Amino acid sequence: MADDSFDVIVIGGGPGGYVAAIRAAQLGKSTAVVEKDKAGGRCLNYACIPAKTMLHTAEVLEEARSSAEIGVKASGVELDWDALGKRRTEVSAGLENGVAGLFKKNKIEFIEGEGSLADDGNVKVGETVYEAGKVIIATGSVAQSIPGVEFSDRVLDTWGAWSLPEQPDSVAVVGAGASGAELASAYIRFGTEVKLIEMLDQILPTEDRDLVRVVERTFKKQGIEVSTGTPVENVEAGPDSVKFSYGDNAAEVDYLMIAGGRVPDVEALGLDAAGVELDDDGRIGIDEYQRTSNQNVYAIGDVVRGPALAHKAMEEGIVAAEHAAGEQTHPVNIDLVPGATFCQPQVASVGLTEAQAKQDGRDIKSAKFKLGGVGAGSVYNDRDGMVKLVVDKQYGEILGAHIVGNRACDMIAELVATMALEGGNQELARIMHPHPTISEAILDAARAVDGWATHA
């Protein structure tokens, strides 16, 4: 029988929520997690993890098909869609069980059901009210369709797109941000015909233009039809296909996959009753320690300002739990939240793009260094990408770092650390990198800022 009183109750068991709960428990607080679905939330069960599992298969499939050029001849290489779906399910289930195990290890109560705030700041689940010293809201976000279009059997959100029972012959992906780019990148390598459509003037709209050129060139080479500046209109979903128009074009595909954005999942929380206010963007307003207008209620992740990314939610969960426990903590620096897109090639970035730095009136210098300039680029067949640094001209402070390449998402953490520790390109240019690795491109990019890259 569950207790009805806890020092900390976390509403939402996704990455931000379970990390917040674990940290609160580590600090000696009696802790509960309220989750209406599975441990691990949407990210683990329906978004990040399933998507990356599918993308890994696409990567292995493509490598197997093209391995003859590196001396490995493979015959009969084909995609087993049923086996892929089974592995996707098993990976998520294994991690879900892992999170449940962490709850048990840390003596965290898992309460199944939809949580809401009572007017006294406690938490209601069904007909039961649980007394809460502090509450951390971590309910994440829900998929948003495009105006005038509803999700259906043929018009899919991202989970629907990643969990199709059969491989489609043709799809159109609407929205070319991180999620849309990943969907397009996976399905083209699976052998599906793909249209990638973005209403803004470039794919990956938040990324530096120099990196986007590399990705767009690769996408087109892979066979993706890329359309920018073209909103999708006149959507007609039938029993077996979807018809629509975009710009001056009309098309019919098996599925329309909408990756146009997400909105905070706050409707069921009863925020008004607890005096929790929203900001001008419709997200929960918070201070630097994740506190809402109700000082006993914290909020993290997709429901608050900043990018909707799991790693941001995790760090905010740490801050919220530590502050709720009365510990000293360090607020999350939103300017240092790295972006990571797992298409092929991968894109990762942190800080300002060159255009943003100029728009802010910063006196900058920038440098680009191609991955093919270092030996590992040839060894690992990763020659087309680059590292780009945007640096303050006077002091060498790194204002932005951008990487495109096969392992960009693993490489970006070094740049985040350098910026967090207030290192400049001068310090980065003197840090030894193991040879031969793709990371050496970061070293030469730092040197290129001052004109002395050794492999340029």
Image (cartoon, helix red, strand yellow):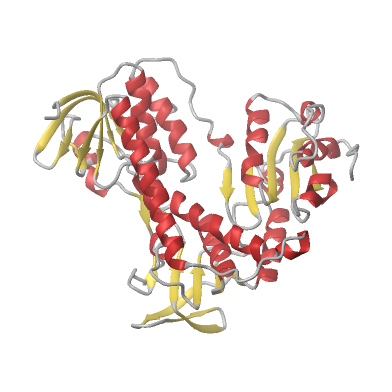
Figure disc tally: 0
Residue at left offset 51%, top offset 72%: 231
Task: Locate residue 439 relative to residue 158 in the image: left or right.
Answer: right
Give residue 355's position: percent from left, percent from top.
Answer: 70, 49
Task: Locate residue 3 relative to residue 254 in the image: left or right.
Answer: left
Residue 412 seen by the camera:
yes
| The quarter of the displayed image where residue 278 is located | top left
Q: Nearer the viewer, residue 340 or 174?
A: 340
Q: Nearer the viewer, residue 377 or 273?
A: 377
Residue at left offset 39%, top offset 15%: 327
Say above or below: 131 vs 138. Answer: above
**Image quadrant where one finds the N terminus:** top left
Residue 351 seen by the camera:
no
Residue furthest to the left: 127
| The quarter of the displayed image where residue 214 is located | bottom right
Residue at left offset 34%, top offset 45%: 41
Give residue 320's position: percent from left, percent from top.
Answer: 38, 27
Say above or below: 49 vs 391. Answer: below
Task: Locate residue 317 relative to residue 417 in the image: left or right.
Answer: left
Q: Nearer the viewer, residue 437 or 80?
A: 80
**Image quadrant where one finds the C terminus:** top right
| The quarter of the displayed image where residue 4 is located | top left
Give residue 289's position: percent from left, percent from top.
Answer: 42, 26
Residue at left offset 57%, top offset 45%: 339
Give residue 382's position: percent from left, percent from top.
Answer: 75, 53
Say above or below: 213 vs 280. Answer: below
